Image (cartoon, helix red, strand yellow):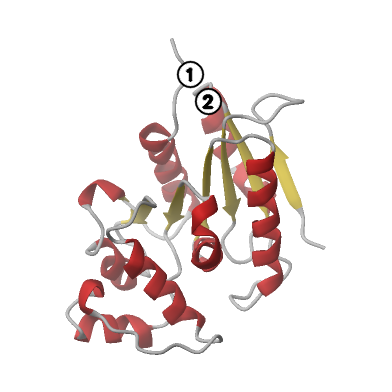
Amino acid sequence: MRRVLIEAACAGRVASQRVLLLPPAYSQPEDFLREGFLEAVRVRGLDLDLVLIEPALQSVTDRGVLAELARQLAAARAAGCTALWLGGISLGAYIALACAVDHSRELDGLVLLAPYLGSHLVTGEIERAGGLARWDPGSLRDEDEERHVWRFIQQQLHGPLPIHLGLGSEDRFGERHRTLATALAASNVDVAPGGHEWPVWRTLWERFLDARIRRPPG
């Protein structure tokens, strides 16, 4: 069974805003708490619930976590949440993208911090095509998840769903990050000094909160 931690802004009610987050590989929901993600929300006084979801398997083929995310999105909307973001770090961000392929209409945005973006095979195709806007993925099989994810990103380049991309300047996945970053508006890309590590992700998270989450009046 997957573990889900809900850190509510106020006990007993659903906040107006919610972010569902998935951790990087070999991490747990509690790591978000240890690294200060909840603290960053609290010190800003945000009306924001955090839902921290742990995949049962550290695998990009774990379809069960996608079903759990869909349930969490539906529950948040049914409870009255008016601003709903989905995201994660590294592999968690990839899983969030895989979920968004089928559930983008339930979302108000994606927050992708240092996302794992699949193999060089697909990003190489995109680069040879002259960029994401010119890439033609062709007819896709159901199991070709990486291309489905990249086609979804391609479809959102001029769509209504905001994609907030946070990157470390020295991240080891930097080449693939740049393939995505160059396709997005500059205002949707945030780069912080450092590599693929928690202190960088904490900085990027704080900047996301400041840029995207509504502050209480006054």
| Apparent side of residue 102 relative to residue 166 in the rendered image (left or right) | right
Q: How many marks?
A: 2
Tag 1: amino acid: Pro
- Which residue in the structure is indicated by mark 1? 216
At 54% from the left and 66% from the top, the residue drawn is: 102
Q: Residue furthest left?
A: 130
In the structure shown, which secondary structural element does the residue marked by tag 1 occupy?
Answer: loop
> The residue under label 2 is which amino acid type?
Leu
Residue 87 shows which numbered tag?
A: none
Displayed quadrant of residue 126: bottom left
Pointer 1 or 2: first along the chain: 2
Q: Residues within 10 Å of mark 2 (few under 14, many from 20)?
A: some
Is mark 1 in CB contact (under 8 Å) with mark 2? yes
Instruction: Identify the residue shown where x is 63% and y is 50%.
Output: 73
Residue 160 location (% of width, % of height): 35, 51
Q: Is residue 106 above or below residue 10?
A: below
Residue 109 in view in this figure: yes
The residues tagged by marks 1 and 2 sit, at their Cα atoms, a distance apart of: 6 Å
Q: Nearer the viewer, residue 57 or 128?
A: 128
Q: Which residue is identified by label 2?
A: 46
Residue drawn at x 53%, y 68% as measured from the top left: 98
Q: Label 2's element?
A: loop
Q: 64 or 36, which is in the foreground?
A: 64
Q: Dot 1, how many residues are within 10 Å of its Cα: few (below 14), some (14-19), or many (20+)?
A: few
Residue 184 vertical position relative to residue 57 in the rendered view, above or below = above
Instruction: Farthest residue to the right: give it.
Output: 1
Q: Where residue 168 sits in the image (x, y, percent)? A: 35, 56
